[in-house]
Amino acid sequence: MYFLGGQILFGGGLIKAILLVIMVSGCVLHPRIRVAAILSSTWLLCIGFLIVEIGYLIFACGMSLGDVLLSYNDYYFLLLVGPALLVFRGAVSERVLIRCTILVFVICAALAAAQHLTSSPILYTESVDGSFSISSWMFGGELRAFSLFGSAIEFGLLCAFSGALGIALTRTMPIRGSLLFLASGLACYTTLTRLSYLVFFGACTCSLVLTFGKKLSRGSWQPLLSFLLGLATIFIGLNSVTSADENVLQDAGSLLGRIDQWIFFSDLYRHSTLAHQMFGLGLVQDKSLLSLYGIVIDNVLLALLLHIGVVGLVLFGVLLTRMWIYLRREAIATQQPFVIAAASLWATFACAGIFDLLFGSFGAIFALAILCERKSGHRTGSEPARVVGSTVT
């Protein structure tokens, strides 16, 4: 948009379509693929449920087929691509992927620093046709650095991942890893977003545990600790409501706004029919699909309940849990820095999901970790072979 005067050359839909074609082609053309061993039961159940759910959302919730597919694209596409990419496991060099990640981070961090120092977005915050916009880039009169991302929190996830990667790299490259960690922390600060800080702290803490811990069970409690950290943040924020401090980072206004939204949507769900509670109301956090209510959901639990009901929540809850377990086991078994960083970021999903919807970002990180993960027979570490060879089942 910067070079085209606010015009969008192509949208994210085209990139996702290309990714889907590549994935399907690989599954069809791969000569030795064993589908049963790769596509887990939970993953297949989630896909099957979404297919059946199309009819329910159309006939019971009044959504058009286009709106249903758009909602699936917003929430689930990148999340479901990751397990499917197990057919390409180890197809990308981890060294190349780490170098590319650091290069992208350096570019994005430099732009974020410029945005922070100049208090100017520098780039367009909305396309001419209105189909793309940066969310919440100003808060309390201060600019939240978003770099090349759609929001400050999305850029904050890159900073958190880079920080966790820096810690994982310190085992073999202590100076470079430490510099990456410090640079990531400074870049994360420019987002002026409390959730970015929480995710950064949680991811880096988990990376320390997975990198330098000795027990095979290490890191297993990190998601729970991350969730409790998120809850503690809510209580601390409520206690500061009466504070006269005008610091944007201590302002409880955004938290109170979220709580109002959660109460509204919780009441809406509670008073819906049993069928809607079980299979959803079809509500999606998308400005083109949520215009009826005009407010956002910003909570994974409520988002899944409102869209696909308690049945969908249970299925995707199990899938998310098993994806995290898979990454943790592979991180311990291979001790690959990129996989450790991915598992560390995923450990914060329980915290991030309290305050925002970031299915796509976490799904993309999972997919990248799969692409560079070493195959059986090329692993290091001390975990038993029965754990190493497990899949997302």
Image (spheres, rainbow, N blue to C red):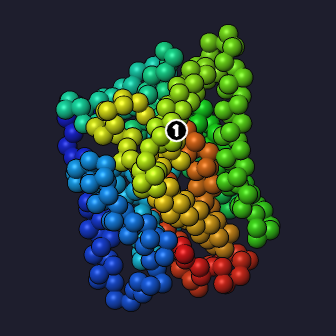
- Asked if 44 appears above or below 247 in the picture, the reply is below
Q: Position of residue 328 (x, y in %)?
A: 64, 65
Q: Residue furthest right?
A: 214
Q: Amino acid at mark 1?
A: Ser
Q: Secondary structure at mark 1?
A: helix
Query: Would you call the spot at circle 1 few (<14 residues within 10 Å), some (14-19), or many (20 or more)?
Result: some
Q: Residue 8, can we see it?
A: yes
Please give the name of the residue rendered at 39% of the width and 89% of the height, measured from the top-left corner.
32
- Asked if 47 appears above or below 63 in the picture, the reply is below
Please give the name of the residue rendered at 34% of the width and 89% of the height, measured from the top-left corner.
31
- According to the picture, the residue beneath numbered tag 1 turns out to be 266
Q: Position of residue 354 (x, y in %)?
A: 58, 42
125 relative position to 329: left or right: left
Q: Residue furthest bottom?
A: 32
316 relative position to 286: left or right: right
Please give the name of the residue rendered at 29% of the width and 83% of the height, measured from the top-left corner.
29
User: Which quadrant does the C terminus fall into?
Assistant: bottom right
Q: Position of residue 138 (x, y in %)?
A: 45, 22
Foreground pick, 175 / 196? 196
340 relative position to 131: left or right: right
Q: Residue 91, can we see it?
A: no
